[in-house]
Each structure stands twice: as structure tokens, then as C-alpha cells.
Image (tube, grey):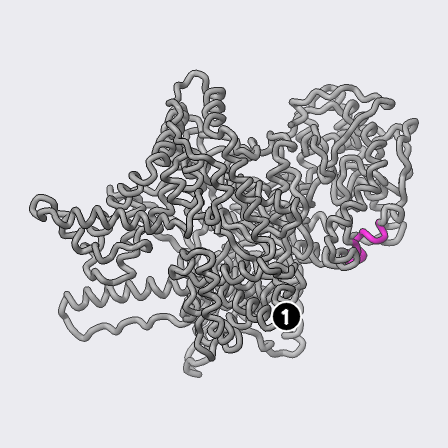
Amino acid sequence: MSCGQTTLPPANISKEFTFHRPLIFHKNPSMISTTAWRNLAKQAISRKQRFHINSQSFSRAYSLLGICQESVFPGNFKPFELSSWSRLRFSEVGFRGKGAISSPEDCMCKPSFWSVRNPIGFNGFCPKGYASVAEAVSSTDVEEDVSVVDEVQELLQQMSIEEKREAQYKQRTRLNRARGMGQGKYHMLKRRQIKIETEAWERAAKEYRELMMDMCEQKLAPNLPYMKSLFLGWFEPLRNAIDKEQDLCRKGKNKAAYAPYIDQLPADMMSVITMHKLMGLLMTGGEHGTCRVVAAACTIGEAIEQEVRIHKFLEMTRKKKVNKDQENGESDAAMKEQEKLNKKVTNLMKKQKLKAVRGIVSKHDASKSWSLEARAKVGSRLIELLTQTAFIQPPADQLADGPPDIRPAFVHTFRTVAKDAKNASRRYGVIECDPLVLKGLEKTARHMVIPYMPMLVPPLNWTGYDKGGYFFLPSYVMRIHGARQQREAIKRTPREQLEPVFKALDTLGNTRWRVNKRVLNVVDRIWATGGRLADLVDRNDVPLPEEPDTEDETLLKKWKWKVKSVKKENMERHSQRCDIELKLAVARKMKDEEGFYYPHNLDFRGRAYPMHPYLNHLGSDLCRGIVEFQEGRPLGKSGLSWLKIHLANLYAGGVDKLSLEGRIAFTENHLDDIFDSVDKPLEGRRWWLKAEDPFQCLAVCINLAEALRSSSPETFISHIPVHQDGSCNGLQHYAALGRDKLGAASVNLVTGEKPADVYSGIAVRVLEIMRRDAQKDPVVFPEALRAKLLINQVDRKLVKQTVMTSVYGVTYIGARDQIKRRLKERGSISDDAEIFGCACYAAKITLTALGEMFEAARGIMSWLGECAKIIASENQPVRWTTPLGLPVVQPYRKFGRHLIKTSLQVLTLQRETEKVMVKRQRTAFPPNFVHSLDSSHMMMTAIACKKAGLSFAGVHDSYWTHACDVDEMNKILREKFVELYETPILENLLESFQQSFPALMFPPLPERGDFDLRDVLESPYFFN
């Protein structure tokens, strides 16, 4: 709640007042917004000095705020005992030297405004209970009027209560954070984590500087890997160009719009950020050695701004005391300047000209966010300087007497793309790298600065929209992608309402992981020998076909088509190789760590994702095989059985559809293959490579073999996460919503001897329809020929993706494309036109079969879509609140164009308009609503598992825990599913729509069946 909306009563010193700090887990949130606290501090300290407090305690009180060093406390009011720096443990907390953080605990306290034993509204890490320095230096809420005197008095009143809690709070925090790793080790790891977050770019710049010095001293180029030598060659010219640009800006000779921003960071750091960010985009952009200028400019500008905030913050904490005279001289000059400013602000405040006061404060506010335009202009200029200074030279195989072939490493050019069938087109700028740079891109990952790495210590607990996650790196609880209404909805929601969501994210973030070194070793061996095994891409490109020596137009046309196809294949291989290199680069960096953590946040529907993007358990089989729980637990009798079941599930190929006993038997029948896979993974029979998820299969083989070979398998310590996956989970949620008996039986909500396979069920129904169609006369019914052609092609794999995505709103076109890909993979139909026709027919039949089997689900989907259409027709987005209290606003709005003239080109940025996209709001609502329900179920399960003492990880509809705890987790997840759907979800949704739009008429709720939800509690294959 913002201060403008909050009425605060005058403080009474003798009156009891309870204040809840953001990182102490109380139920009531602070009633004062982030900006209000900042304004309050700035306005208060700009008043005339009339307070008297131990100046030593406040010796740095002004360092972050940059206003003055005056106290805000009346001399006759001393509700607490002031502390010296040593009593605050600041001798342990502060920065001892550049980059040397000596404290684990409160590394960010020094610049805090309130330097007292009990910082009012502080969490022990940074001002006002900010959960991270990123928030402390980047909060950009709209500032509102505040009553300074009342709020200062109220703050003072809160201090006395907070003073009593501080010792208990710090003790709890230490115990919670250490989590069994020992306080000393935790402190050491936290220091390392802070250095990783704050000094990554600085370390990279320092490394390049040192390499340049070595080169100058030894007068020869160091023996570096190819891409690192390129980075080194580009570093100095780009740094010098930026330095020159900064010098012009400082002298006022450069009046460009980016001038005030480009001088805020050392040139060498700007140089490194520009190179690494651009190369990262070229690796992951999916356009084979090119990236769009708009994306590159905004990404680089944002990275520069983020580093500017951290750099400025750290610079203030790193300043060493110089000789006293110089310090006093500087202080006197600063004080004179501040006196003028204070006088001006005081006069304006007396006249109630708060708008003018805000203008002065924001001008002196180092934490003011850059505009999108500023980021784009800074990024564009840095890219332009890189294109002007970065060159590449081919290997020395040129003729000695020929001129050296030195050419630009990056070229700025334009491309044209057709917009529609009316010959309309659009031009956009791209940065294209030289083929020699492209060749080395795949090996760039190991030399890249990768932000948002897994954390070495538990993440900060979430307490607000931008309070939690990483210590310094900007962390937001939801990925809103610029959707203003969604951000406002989250910020307006009371903290106690979001508490279950925060607890769930904290549970996911506090699960400790480690790298499975044995699996990583096998991956490295396969990758070093060219890939091609276990779904790893081939490291070599497909050779281009030679041009035929003919003038036959048909043969030439066929050759050109093949060349185009091979080039496309090579582009896809290149993209996959870059992705694998990034994953392996992270794995190699983390493999020697005892453990690490993944901070999580949400998408707008409430689904949870790790904030680190490359190596995490939501990734591919490669990622999941490489990571495992850091904590190990004894298998026990049930754990040993579940490990065998898990191995069968990963092998798949129909084995995962057997009963649980059948899966155990499968594993026991293949023990020789399992031992051979462990002992000779690449030299033996390679049984594990036949699995659907080979690397995860290998990891479980290793674990199971070690357990069986031990003296006591049941006491063997296992680190493997065992998965329990929903059976077509979207349809499970629809069946529960509609109390649909037929649908419930199809997706294992009821007890069965073996798991029901909805995909096989749909495939059987599709085959029945096609056999009937095949009997018809092709003259009357042309599809009869296609039905005959497809009868031998129909199986669960053909229809699986369409069935899986049907509940998420797959359209006929989407289903057609999915089936077309499956048919093309099989190669039984060679003609492209025939494949297309068959895919059209098969998609139509598959959707018909789905409608018959899941009639109740179709009814609910139609009702949800109709409600969304009614709301969107009023130019309003569809919004709802999940059962866990998370507000959701669908972000689909029409975009307007915003042109920004930069030194490189005119950039066209998209901006949200007030006009919603009616069709998109309608079609997206049913799948988004179901996603919000499956995320609620996962979060409820996560919280309950933590309470029960289980380790837990979640991948949407796949829940993971230790083998010994699977039975307990299964019980919990079933209970939570029943608990979720015993609430009147659809009734509550309709009521919220009617309250928000009383003038609109909504259709009645769809009819529901009589399925008994409590049958889920006894269903062994609900999740399995």
C-alpha cells in the first residue's frame, strides 16, 4: 500500500506499536511503501540540524543517500541505546579492501541510513528491510506525498519494540541460513556468493588488463584459446574508444542523450559487458550468428545500468579513510553544498511545494531507474563502438606477399521480412558476426560471464515483489515482461495474502543440489569425441552437397533445395551446440562445490522456474542427469523399490505403462545390463543409451548398482531425486473441476490395476474412426484414401502431443503441425503435399476423439473462453486470483510503436497500449487458468512436504523427492489435490467476475458430474 493511500495516526511514545519487518516472518506487511521510506529519510535529513546523536554511529549515514549527515532524532528522545560500529559487528561486516568483503552477515549495512543497533525497518542486510541491495538501489515506485513528522515519530516508536527482537531475530536468521552446514562455512560461502554477484564483470575486466600487461612485458601474445584471444584483441581498442567517449562527455563536448549515462562505469567494465552480452545474444538468439539491434541495445543498456547500481553502491562502501585534513576538507566542501540544498528543500517544504521537492530528491537519487530510451541509446552507442573497433584476421595461411585480410568482426546491416500476404514488409537492423567468429561461438561459453549462477548459500526469502532471491542481482518474484497491470496487482496485494506463494518459492529455493560428477564425466567423454550419443547433437556440420555439373533446371532446383535444407540443419546443430556448451560450462564451474541452490520465481500464471537459465532441473535430460540432491538419505525398503521403479520410468518405451510391480520386475531382470552400464558406460553393451532419458537412466543405474553392491542396500545413502509425474495433468485438473467420471478414469484419478494411458485410449478411438472412413467410397468421401494410408501409422506417439496440449488450447492448425512433424520423422510418406493432407485429416479426427472422451473438459473450456470474451469485449483484461492468493492479469494487449533515434539506427520498440487483444484473451484464458491451478497444487504440496521434513523439487506437474520419502510425498500430493478441489473454484471465479463487472451477463456454470474426489486418495497411478 502506498503512503498516499495510508492514513497514519500520530505517534504516541508510550503507546504499544507492533512493526513487522520484511524478513521476520510475521503475518502483517509493512504499511509504508519502499519509496515512502526513501522519501521520508531524504526529506527528514534535509531539515535543519536540531537533533543530537553520537556522530560516530552515523559517520556514514549520508553515504548512500547523498544528502547530508544530520540526524533525524530529537535530542530529548532516546528510546534505544546507540551502538558503535564494533558492537554492530561492523568490524566483521564491512569491506576491508577492494573486493574483499569480510562479513557474511550484513555486508550491506555500512551505507544504511539508520546506523544503530536496531535499524528501524531494516532486515540486517540493507535499508528498510530491503531483501536485496538490488532493491535498495533500484526501487522505482511512483513517489507520493508523505507526512514527515508523523512518520518519523512513528518510526521512533517502532524502534523500541524492534530493539528487543533484534538479538532473537539474528540468532534465528543465522540458524535458518546455516542449515546444517555450520555457521563458519555459511559465512565463508556467503562472502563468496556476494563476490560472485558483485564482482563478475570487474574480475573479467581485471583479467583482460593483466593479460594485456603480460603481452606488453613479454612482447608476445599469450597462448590463449581461440575465442579468449579474440576477446582480448577486442578489449583494448573498445576500452580506449569508450574512454575517449567518456572524456568528451565529461568535458561537455558530447551533448548526446546517452552522455549522462555512459560515464557512470569504468571503460574497461563497459567494454567487457558489451562484448560478453553481445556474444551471449549471438549464441542464444537462434538466428545463426546474428541478433537484432533492438534486443542487443536494450540488453546491453540494461546490463550496464544494473552494474552501475552495484558499482556505485560498492564504491561507497569501499572508500578508505584518507588523511584527516583531506577528509575534513572534502567534508567541509560537501557540507557547504548540502547546506544550500537543504535550505532550498526546507523552504519548498514549508510552502508545501512537494512536487519541487521530489524533483530535487530524484535528481540526487542515485537509485533512479534509467528510462527504456536511455538504455537503448547507451546500448546502441556501445554496439556502434564495438563494430568500429573489433576486427578479425584469418589464420596465417595467406601468401606472405599478400596484404593481411583484416576485416570487421561484427557488421551492422538490415534485413527485410514480409509482414503479410499483401506484399507489405518490414526492415529491422541486425548485428552479424564474421564466419570466423561464428565458428568459435560454440566454444565461447567457458569464457563467458554468466550472471544469475546457482547460489552457494540459500537465497533470501521472498517478502515482496522485488524482495528476495539474490543478494545483489535484481530479483523479482514474477516475470512480468513489462506488463504494468500485473506488476501493480502484485505490489498492491497484502503480504499475508501472498505468504503461501512466498513460502512455496522459499521451499523450492532452499533445496540444495550438487553436480553428479560421474555422469558429467561420461557427458564430457561423449562430447569430446564429437557428440552424437544420448541425444547429444553432432559437433560436426552436415557437408553441403556439391553442385551438379548440369544445366537441367529440375536437378539444379533439387540441389538448391538440398543446400537450403542442409544449411537449416547446420543452423539448428549450431544452436544446440551453443546450448550444450553453456550447460556444460555451468556444470564445470559448479562441480567442485559442495552444494548450490536455485532461487525461484514465477511466470504470470504462478508457475515456478529457477532464475538460473541454463543448468537446472527444469531443463533437458542432460541437465537432469547432471544434477542431484546434495543431501543424501538412506534408501530403506520402500526407497529401494522406488529407485527400481524410477529406473523403469526413465527407460520408458512402454515399460512406464506397466504396473508398479511390473516395473520393479523389469529392473530386476536387467541387473546385468545395469551393472555393465555402470562399469563400462561407453565400452560395454551401452544398455542405458536405449533409454528415453539416457543420462538420468545412467545416474540411477550408478546409484542402484552402488546400493546393491553395498553390504546393506537399504541403508545406502541415495542422492537421486525420484519423480512422481501427473498423468496428462491438465486433463486431471479438468476432470476434477467437472467431477467427470469418464475423464477421471482416463487420467488415473481412480484406482486401477495398472495405469490408464489416455494417449493410447485416444489413439484407439482415432483408429476406429479411420477404419470406418477407410471403408467409404473415395469418390464421395475423398478422405477415405488418406484414412487407408494412415491406418498403419496411428499409435500413441502420433497423437500424444496433441492430446497433451489440447487442454492448453491447441488449435486445429497447431494439432496439424504437431502430427505433420511426427509423420515426417517416420519417413513412410515421402511427398510433402501428401504429408500435409494426411496431417490435416489426422488432426481433425484426433480433436473429434478428444471431444468425445473429455466432453466435460470441453464444456468447462468453452465456458471459460466465453467469460473471457465477454470481459475482453469491454476492453478489460481477464484477471483472477489463484486458490493460493496470487493475483493474475492476462497481459495480452495490442502494441504501439515507439521510435528511438540512436547513433546506430532508429530503433522501433513495442509498448503496451490500452487496447486488449480480445481473441487472445479468450483463447489463452482456459490454459492459463489451468496452469494457475496446477501451480497452486504444486505449491501446496511443496509447503506440506517442507513441514513434513522432506526435500522437494517441482517441475510443474512432476514432483521430486528422495526415494525413501516417495510414499510420504504421494500421500501429501493426493491430500493437497483433494483439498484444492474441495473449494468451489469455478463458483468463486464466477463470483469474482460478477463483482468486477456487475453490468455484464455471464453464462451459467457448466454442469458437473458426480465423481467423488476422495477416490484420488486411493489411486496409486494418479501421480506415478
Q: Residue furthest left?
A: 779
Residue drawn at x 83%, y 53% is: 92
Relative vertical location of residue 756 with respect to residue 997 in this rendering, above or below = below
Compare residues 794 and 248 and report the one nearer the observer: 794
Looking at the rendered structure, the kind of residue marked 1 is: Met
* Segment colored magenta: 90-103
Residue drawn at x 70%, y 29% is: 32
Measured as percent of width and height from the top left, residue 467 is found at: 65, 41
Compare residues 488 and 768 and report the one nearer the observer: 768
The residue wearing badge 1 is 212
Q: Residue furthest bottom?
A: 400
Asked where in the image residue 850 lies, by quadrant, the reply is top left
Q: Is residue 675 left or right of residue 567?
A: right
Q: State yes or no: residue 529 in magenta.
A: no
Does residue 579 appear in this view?
no
Q: Residue furthest top?
A: 999
Compare residues 94 and 80 and report the one nearer the observer: 80
Callout 1: few (<14), some (14-19), or many (20+) C-alpha neighbours within 10 Å? some
Measured as percent of width and height from the top left, residue 598 is found at: 60, 53
Residue drawn at x 18%, y 50% is: 771
Measured as percent of width and height from the top left, residue 1003 is found at: 37, 23
Compare residues 27 and 466 and report the one nearer the observer: 27
Q: Is residue 664 left or right of residue 797?
A: right
